[in-house]
């Protein structure tokens, strides 16, 4: 993805790998990453050749770690642009998530860099006007940079359903993490955020009517006094 001069050894045939119904691009990207790393903990960024995941390029992306828990999109396929309705290169990956899910996504991303390990995020978003409900998955696979540090991610995002009005942002429902070669797999499930439908309904510009309480007869403010004139 964006690199030239690669040797044929980086182009791995994916025809023998079983794909998951609806999420075939994720299976292809994961199989390519596994084939490249071999007995290593992970491949290098320079190992990636777009021809190896040609059928999944629309859904693939490359992230660069720019701060703790922050990954910026360096390269992104057309599917990601379609979801946001704009060019996404240079955006943080958390831009695809709602505000309540962003801290969890940052935590999951940092674990990819620090452990390092593979992570699959399960996404969903509720329906709203002009925006049908969607479900999706995002795969995050660590890569070494040319300097040897773990600061890159090969990713894949597949969302199922009609996109509707953009931009579309998602809630994080579950994160499945696997650390190292043959490491343990654990799944973290998150409670669904409060849906907008449970909030009080707005009434436009109308304001509630204030209750009226009559003053007690004979009560006068303390700063007023009665002045009698001697003249008629």
Image: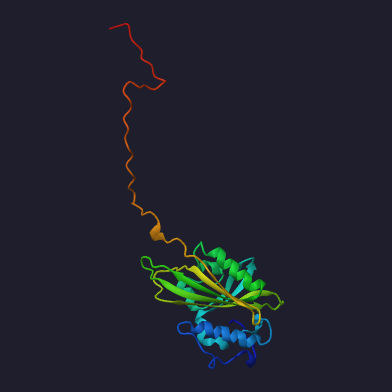
Where residue 158 appears, x then y in whole percent? 48, 78
Where residue 113 appears, x then y in whole percent? 65, 72
Q: How is the image coloured?
A: rainbow
Where residue 59 appears, x then y in whole percent? 51, 79
Please give the count of numbered marks on the rendered protein.
0
**Is residue 50 visible in the rendered structure shown here?**
no
Q: Quadrant of residue 40?
A: bottom right
Where residue 202 appears, x then y in whole percent? 36, 53
Q: Quadrant of residue 187?
A: bottom right
- Front one among 85 and 193: 193
Give me the residue at 32% from left, 38% from top. Answer: 211
- Front one among 4 and 94: 94
**Is residue 194 visible in the rendered structure shown here?**
yes
Q: Residue furthest left?
A: 232
Q: On the rendered structure, is 89 left or right of 212?
A: right
Q: Where is the N terminus found, in terms of image quarters?
A: bottom right
Give me the residue at 39% from left, 22% from top. Answer: 221
Residue 156's place in the image compared with 105, above or below, is: below
Q: Quadrant of residue 52?
A: bottom right
Q: Where is the C terminus found, in terms of image quarters?
A: top left
- Front one among 22 and 190: 190
Give me the residue at 53% from left, 87% from top. Answer: 54
């Amino acid at each position: 993805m964006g690199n030239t001069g690669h040797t044929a050894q980086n182009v791995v045939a994916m025809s023998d790998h079983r794909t998951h119904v609806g999420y075939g691009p994720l299976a292809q990207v994961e199989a390519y990453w596994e084939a490249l790393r071999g007995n290593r903990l992970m491949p290098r960024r320079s190992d990636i050749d777009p021809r190896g995941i040609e059928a999944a390029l629309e859904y693939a992306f490359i992230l660069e770690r720019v701060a703790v828990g922050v990954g910026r999109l360096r390269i992104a396929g057309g599917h990601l642009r379609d979801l946001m309705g704009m060019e996404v290169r240079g955006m943080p990956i958390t831009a695809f998530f709602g505000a309540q899910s962003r801290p969890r996504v940052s935590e999951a991303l940092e674990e990819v860099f620090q452990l390092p390990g593979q992570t699959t995020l399960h996404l969903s978003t509720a329906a709203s006007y002009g925006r049908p409900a969607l479900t999706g998955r995002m795969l995050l696979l660590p890569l070494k940079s040319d300097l040897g540090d773990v600061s890159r991610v090969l990713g894949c995002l597949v969302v199922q359903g009609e996109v509707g009005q953009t931009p579309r942002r998602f809630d994080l429902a579950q994160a499945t993490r696997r650390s190292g070669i043959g490491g343990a797999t654990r799944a973290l499930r998150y409670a669904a955020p409060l849906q907008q439908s449970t909030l009080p309904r707005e009434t436009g510009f109308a304001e509630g009517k204030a209750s009226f309480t009559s003053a007690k007869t004979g009560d006068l403010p303390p700063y007023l006094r009665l002045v009698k004139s001697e003249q008629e």
